[in-house]
Image (tube, rainbow, N blue to C red):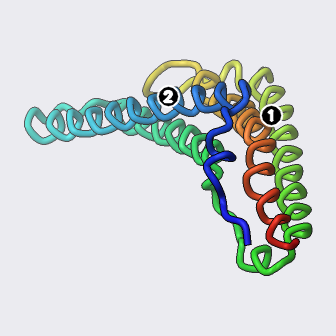
Amino acid sequence: MRTLTTDYLARPAGRLYRASRLLAAIEQGLCSGLIIAFSVLLIVNVIARYAFSSPIFFAEELAVYILVWMAFLAISVSIHHDQHVRLTMLIGSLPAGMQRACYWLTELICLAILATLLWYSIGWIRSPSVAYDIAITLDWPKWHFYLIVPIFCASAIFHILARLPDRTRTVFVLASDDEE
C-alpha cells in the first residue's frame, strides 16, 4: 500500500492553481473586511437606536447585502479548498477508477451549473428591470449588490478548473497505486 509521499507534495503547483490561491486569499480578505463592516454597522446602529433614539435607517438593508456578499465569497473560498458539501460515504466504498469517474462527473456537473448560472446572471443584471431597481433606504442601484452572483460563478469556475489537475494527481494516482 502506497501512502502520500513528499514528492507529490513538493511538486510546485501550476500557475493556474497559484492564481486560484491568490484569488481565494483576496476573497478571504474581502470576507474578513465584510465581517468587520457588518459588525461595526450593527453595533453602531444599536447604539444609535437605544442611546440616541435615532437608528441608522439603512443599516438593516445594507446588513442583508453584506451577508449575501459574505456568503457567496465564503462559498467560493470553500470551493477553492475543495471543502464544499459533498456526500462521500457511497463514493468512498467504490474502487479507485469509479471514484475518479464520480469525481470528474460531479465536477463537470458543477462546472455546467455554474456556467449556466453565470450566463443567466449576466443577462439578468443587464436587463432593464434590474438597471432601474433602486435599494429603498440606500437610494443606490441594486445591480451593484447583484454583481456578486456572476462574480461568484466566475471565481468558482476558475477555482474548480485550477484544482482539477492537482486534485486528480494527488488523490487518484495514489488510489490507483493501492490497487496494484
Nearest the eye: 32 or 174: 174
Question: Could you tell me how far apart the alpha carbons at marks 1 and 2 are, in whole angstroms?
Answer: 26 Å
Q: Could you tell me which residue is drawn at 68 percent across and 29 percent down? A: 151
Q: Amino acid at mark 2?
A: Ile
SS of the residue under disc 2: loop
- Looking at the image, which residue sits at the far left? 51
Q: Amino acid at mark 1?
A: Leu
Q: Of marks 1 and 2, which one's residue comes earlier in the chain?
A: 1
The crowding category of the residue bearing disc 1, from other C-alpha atoms within 10 Å (few below 14, some 14 to 19, many at least 20), is some
Question: Where residue 31 sits in the image (x, y, percent)?
Answer: 45, 35
Nearest the eye: 28 or 172: 172
Q: Quadrant of the C terminus?
A: bottom right
Q: Is residue 19 left or right of residue 64?
A: right
Which residue was labeled with disc 1? 118
Q: Could you tell me which residue is drawn at 29 percent across and 33 percent down? A: 41
Pointer 1 with pointer 2, Cβ within 8 A = no
Q: Quadrant of the N terminus?
A: bottom right
Question: Where residue 143 sits in the image (x, y, percent)?
Answer: 64, 23
Q: Is residue 103 left or right of residue 101?
A: left
SS of the residue under disc 1: helix
Q: Is residue 177 left or right of residue 153?
A: right
Q: Could you tell me which residue is drawn at 71 percent across and 71 percent down? A: 87
Q: Quadrant of residue 86?
A: bottom right
177 to 94, vertically: above or below: above
Q: Could you tell me which residue is drawn at 80 percent across and 42 percent down? A: 165
Question: Where residue 144 sits in the image (x, y, percent)?
Answer: 60, 21
Mark sitting on residue 136: 2
Q: Quadrant of residue 54?
A: top left
